[in-house]
Each structure stands twice: as C-alpha cells, then as structure tokens.
Image (tube, rainbow, N blue to C red):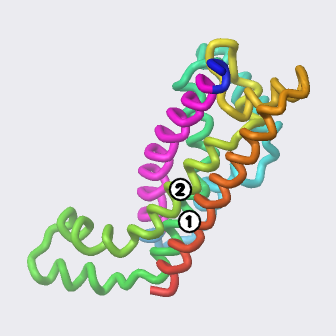
Amino acid sequence: NPDWLSSFFNSLRVAGLVAVAATLIGTLASLGLSRMKHSGAGLLRAILITPMIVPGVVLAIGIYAVYLDYQFVGTTTGFVIAHTMLAIPFVIIAVSASLEVFDVRLETAAASLGANRFTTFRTVTLPLIAPGILSGLLFAFVTSFDEIIVALFITSPYLKTLPVQIFTSITRDADPTVTAVGTIIFIATTLIISAGLIISSKSTRS
C-alpha cells in the first residue's frame, strides 16, 4: 500500500535524522553538565529533561502554535526539530550514566603525555562513553519513530509518519493492516529498547 510505505519511510527518515541530532546535542550537553561544578548544573539538567515531564498534549499545543508562525507544520524540518527536543532527555540520561563511572584521571594522564583536548576526547573519553552514546542514539530513534501526540498536531496530508497513519486508519475503518503493522512496530521497538538497556547496563558495570 503506497500510503503505508510512504508513512513508514517518512518515519524512518525523520527518526534517523532525530537520532543523529539528539545524540550530538545530548552528548555535548552531558559532557558540559559533567564538567560544571556549581549548583546551576542541577537546574540546567532539570530544564533539559523537562520534555519528559511536561504532558505531551501541552507540548504539542505549544509546538503547533509556534510552527504556525514559522510555517513548519507538515515539514520534515518541523518533525525533526520537535522530535529532537523530545529525544534529547533520553540521550542525556544515557550518556550521563556513562560519565558517572568515567575516571577523569585518564584525561589528566593523557594530557600529561602531551595529548591536546581534542586528541584526549577522541582517544580516551569518546571510546569509554561510546556505549552510553549508542544507547542514547537507540532511545532517540525509538522516541521519534513511535511518537504520535506531537505528530498529530504538526502532520499534513503530504507528510504522515507511521504512527499517524495507524491512528488515521483506526479512526477511519477496521483495517487488518493496522494489526500487522502494530505487531511489527512492537517487536522492533522492544528489540531496540532491550539492546539499549543491555548496552547501558554494560557501560555502567564497566
């Protein structure tokens, strides 16, 4: 069915872009927060994970109101920005867990051997927190791929994600395709989340 295939590839494209953007921003934010020594770090962390706490409908209404002014409704850019905001908290939590067990003395040792900051980050810090980054990337991908509330507000007839297509099909008729697609999404999401949890737990133990 062209509608289902189109919505699937739309979700795949948006989720892929969101995973990359959220992982980059969330990783940098986590690194910055881990280096902050004053009490403002806690407040800033709370602000960054706010999208996990605020009800989805409230966020959706706010995003929709802003998007109307900037003509982002029904665009790939609009979906990516909105879903990235929702996914960043998951990346921050995953990467922060890796940074909690990271020994900063390793960076000091690398610097004492002549490595500059970029070299230290590339050869010491990044490999050690890579499991947390990968875990955050998987969670960001799933968050975008399965998101429905915000997507319903900013979708258009020309750009529908798979969850929106499922919702539309359910409200229109009793199409058995919904059951098949829902089962596939459930299995795929479960496998991805399980992989993220395994990677995150290994990173924490190491």
Quarter of the image where the C terminus is located: bottom left
Residue 15 in the magenta stretch? The answer is: yes
User: Relative to 184, is 129 above or below?
Assistant: below
Residue at the image position 37 percent from the left and 85 percent from the top:
103
Callout 1: few (<14), some (14-19), or many (20+) C-alpha neighbours within 10 Å? many
Residue at the image position 50 percent from the left and 46 percent from the top:
19
User: Relative to 44, is 106 above or below?
Assistant: below
Q: Foreground: 81 or 203?
A: 203
Q: Relative to residue 205, is residue 191 drawn left or right?
A: right
Residue at the image position 40 percent from the left and 71 percent from the top:
129
Tag 1 residue: 196
Residue 111 in the magenta stretch? The answer is: no
Q: The residue under label 1 is which amino acid type?
A: Gly
**Distance (Cα) linking label 1 and label 2:** 6 Å
Labels in figure, total? 2
User: Relative to 3, is 94 above or below?
Assistant: below
Q: Quadrant of residue 4?
A: top right
Callout 2: few (<14), some (14-19), or many (20+) C-alpha neighbours within 10 Å? many
Across and down, in percent, residue 51 comes to 69, 48
Q: The residue under label 2 is which amino acid type?
A: Leu
Across and down, in percent, residue 124 comes to 26, 74
Label located before the other in sequence (1 or 2): 2
Q: What's the magenta region?
A: 5-33
Across and down, in percent, residue 95 comes to 49, 66
User: Relative to 111, is 82 above or below?
Assistant: above
Our reading of the magenta stretch's main secondary structure is: helix
Q: Quadrant of residue 169?
A: top right
Q: Could you tell me if the residues under marks 1 and 2 are in contact, i.e. CB atoms within 8 Å?
A: yes
Quarter of the image where the N terminus is located: top right
Label ID, residue 138: 2
